Image (tube, rainbow, N blue to C red):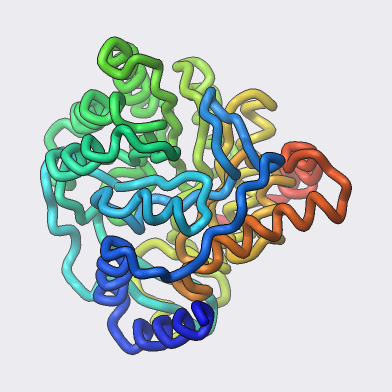
Amino acid sequence: MLGAIEKLGRRALFCLDPETAHGLSIKALKAGVPVALAPRLDARLKTTVAGITFDNPLGMAAGYDKNAEVPDALLRLGFGFAEVGTLTPLPQAGNPRPRIFRLTADGAVINRLGFNNEGHDAAERRLSERAWRAGVVGVNIGANKDSTDRIRDYVLGVERFAPLASYLTVNISSPNTPGLRDMQARAALAELLRAVAAARDAAVPAAGRKTPIFLKIAPDLHDADFEDIATEVMERSIEGVIVSNTTTSRPDLRSPDRAETGGLSGRPLFERSTIALAKMRRLLGPKHAVVGVGGVDSTETALEKIRAGADLVQFYTGMVYAGPALPGQIVKGFSKFLDREGLRSLADIRDSRLDHWADRPLQL
């Protein structure tokens, strides 16, 4: 019955423009509409990364729950964790609409949202209200478009959310805020990571722990860029890297809106993001956390991210096309895979295809 309702609901949402449909899906989750059944907990899927124990390694990527409105509802869909944001200190409207485009023939989306969100105050209030609840909720922080001191914006994000977040994600990889990706250059990155690490350390008394920091990077980088980023992450004691954000590249696409500007996500991003993931894993070594994002829309694509070096996997666009049952389906698929292969943990396959992916060139 839920499956039929879900199909009808998705068909109705696809009759609306993507941003309106997104807003309605948030409202449905807030209202407690039973959109999908969560899978049973499987102890074999528990994953400990950066000192955090996740019920399973599948997470909702940032960008869906921009204002921290429905993290617990997302966890009930079967996700092992949910990442909210990107949050900026001050509210901002983002770029003009239309700014989201479905590329249905390609299983992809192009967006140029521009960190539209209600700001720190609104998100802090919501996260404070759910602070007593179980479940891993990460907070993705960014800088306002018109900020005169972007590093300060990130420091403010750490100060606000270190006590409330399971982990913090420093997002310097969105292509939709002019100049933001320049912060991935080594000198700028060193300055940023030094500042956020210091802010995180200063927040330990309030947080009661050292809140892990992950750095979210773009897939549109040269090998030398990956090397610089890995070096700075290790030198600044950053716990991990999320690979990757959307791409500005345009592989062969068929959909009418393929020429729209913005970041491309979904199925066409899988290859590029997985190559970038493996390159980063090879550079960081086995101990740092690596989160794989980009093109995940099935159990097999999620498993391939782990084979390429990911400890955790996130997705968002895949659910646009497959619906809210997808996280539960992927998690159930994880359990069936372990049964079939006779494995005790998904960690047993991590890095098993690292060389296959890391040796491949990234065409920029």
Q: Residue at x 73, y 37 (%)?
A: 347
Residue drawn at the location 21% of the way across and 56% of the way down: 116
Against 18, residue 115 (above or below) is above
Q: Residue at x 88, y 47 (%)?
A: 342
**Vertical order, 265 against 252 (above or below):** above
Q: Report the number of numbered marks.
A: 0
Residue closer to the observer: 303 or 68: 68
Note whether residue 219 is visible: no
Q: Image quarter for residue 122?
A: top left
Percent x, y of residue 189: 38, 28
Compared with 118, 14 (above or below) is: below
For image coordinates 43% across by 70% down, the residue present is 35
The quarter of the rendered structure image containing the C terminus is bottom right
> Residue 209 at what x, y percent from top left?
39, 16
Residue 268 picture quarter: bottom right
Q: 236 or 87: which is nearer to us? A: 87
The percent coordinates of residue 119 (x first, y second) are 15, 45
Work out whether residue 205 or residue 180 is closer to the camera in this orientation and state it. 205
Q: Is residue 55 visible?
A: yes
36 sits left or right of 137 in the view: right
Q: Nearer the viewer, residue 149 or 84?
A: 84
Q: Position of residue 270 (x, y in %)?
A: 60, 60
